[in-house]
Amino acid sequence: MTSTPRSPSSTSPVVAGLLLAAGGGRRLGGRPKALLEHRGGLLVEHAVRTLREGGCGPVQVVLGAAADEVRARADLSGCSVSVNPEWTEGMGSSLRSGLAALAGSGADAVVVLLVDQPGIGARAVARVRSAYRSRTSLAAASYAGERGHPVLFGADLWTDIAAGAVGDQGARAYLRAHRDAITLVECSDVAQAYDIDTPEDLTHLE
């Protein structure tokens, strides 16, 4: 992927938001995570709002499990929505699908958020977004020194990240291999990085 260098006087960078919302909730008894209810709406709507309020746009949503029902029930207006037909293979396939969908968007970088982490709000997204410096930027939220989500990928890295996104690892292998290049952005004071994976985790939803 080629890039056009920006001059200091050029416009602000375009940082897209990518929401991975394809999971089928296997450990939740097959309840698709995007359709879980939270704060008077659906979890997928909450996550889209988080990306937008954190300063990301355009917003790309990747669906998978119960995609037709999610489209019918969720207000995803203003988003680009794609369906990953290989969602059962794990998060890696959804990350590849999302990055491919954004390839022609003109975005300089993307902030990736997972639908099942509602404790991560707009302030954490904004902090990670602010770590953008160039189309080779690599940044991630940090919680007491431990790397987590959201993550930011400069557009010039997308091809390599997608190539290594397999199974349920997402970008984990790429991030491990390039740990020295990652800007860690501490977010433990503004966010909680729990996952909604099991019935017990549903207590986090309001």
Image (spheres, rainbow, N blue to C red):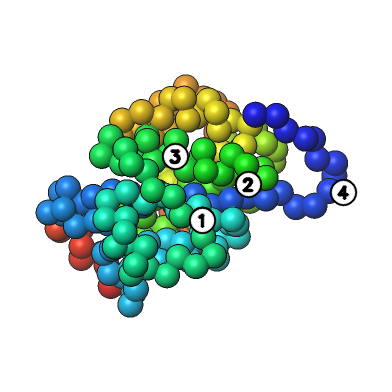
- Asked if disc 1 and disc 2 are in contact, CB closer than 8 Å, the reply is yes
Q: Name the N-terminal-most of marks 3 and 4.
A: 4
Pick the residue in front: 29 or 113: 29
- Choose mark 1 or mark 4, whichever is in front: 1
Q: Secondary structure at mark 3?
A: helix
The residue tagged 2 is: 105
Mark seen at residue 197: none
Q: Residue at x 20, y 65 (%)?
A: 203
Q: Residue 205: x, y in percent?
A: 27, 67
Res 67 → quadrant: bottom left
Pick the residue in front: 134 or 44: 44
- Asked if disc 1 and disc 4 are in contact, CB closer than 8 Å, the reply is no
The residue tagged 3 is: 97
Q: Secondary structure at mark 4?
A: loop
The residue tagged 1 is: 80
Q: Residue 38: x, y in percent?
A: 31, 70
Q: Amino acid at mark 1?
A: Ser
- In the rendered image, which quarter contains the N terminus? top right
